[in-house]
């Protein structure tokens, strides 16, 4: 599965669990840590877990397993690392505090609508 295909699966899975403010950063020309960041919000710890679990399930069904997962215990920020795609599911306050979009402000954004087709 290509990184872009993984990205589409992850975004669709997050959207299916009603993640809000989904943003996709194309970071492949800026770093070697990943090709894409998916950043989204959940309204509660339960929703953040549901988003993360759905992303994991859909990517597992596509033959992809995460290299690492972090944050399930607190569920205010869950990170799923698939190598080329890293998914960040946040509580709004945590997202504002860490401000990943600001840190990666040079990264082009990919329209989410394009990925949900």
Image (cartoon, helix red, strand yellow):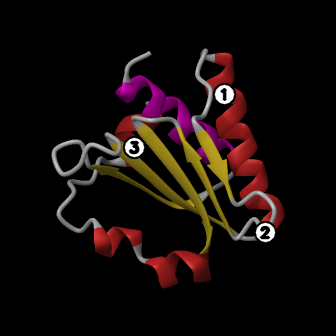
Residue position for label 3 = 113
Q: Residues within 10 Å of mark 3 (few under 14, many from 20)?
A: few
| Residue at the image point whose x is 77% and y is 59% from the top | 47
> For numbered disc 2, what is the local secondary structure?
loop
Q: Are marks 3 and 1 in contact (CB under 8 Å)?
A: no
Of circles 3 and 1, which is in front? 1
**Residue 59 shown left or right of residue 49 in the figure:** left
Q: Main secondary structure of the magenta part?
A: helix
Residue position for label 1 = 58
Instruction: Say which mark, if any, is on residue 74.
Output: 2
Q: Distance between the Cα atoms at labels 2 and 3?
A: 30 Å
Q: Distance between the Cα atoms at labels 1 and 2?
A: 22 Å
Q: Position of residue 2 (x, y in %)?
A: 38, 19
Can you say whether 117 is above or below 81 in the image?
above
Q: Which residues are magenta?
A: 3-16
First in residue order: circle 2 vs circle 3: 2
> For numbered disc 1, what is the local secondary structure?
helix
Q: Position of residue 66 (x, y in %)?
A: 60, 34
The C terminus, quarter of image: top left
Q: Position of residue 91 (x, y in %)?
A: 65, 73
Q: Position of residue 116 (x, y in %)?
A: 47, 36
């Amino acid at each position: 599965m290509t990184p872009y295909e993984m990205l589409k699966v992850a975004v669709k899975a997050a959207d299916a669990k009603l993640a809000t403010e989904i943003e996709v950063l194309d970071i492949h020309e800026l770093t070697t840590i990943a090709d894409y960041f998916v950043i989204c919000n959940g309204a509660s710890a339960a929703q953040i877990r549901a988003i993360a679990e759905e992303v994991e399930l859909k990517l597992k069904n596509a033959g992809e397993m995460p290299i690492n997962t972090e944050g399930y215990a607190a569920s205010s920020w869950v990170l799923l690392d698939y190598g080329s795609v890293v998914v960040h599911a946040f509580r709004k306050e945590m997202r504002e505090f860490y401000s990943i979009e600001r840190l990666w402000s040079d990264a082009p954004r990919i329209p989410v609508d394009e990925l949900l087709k």
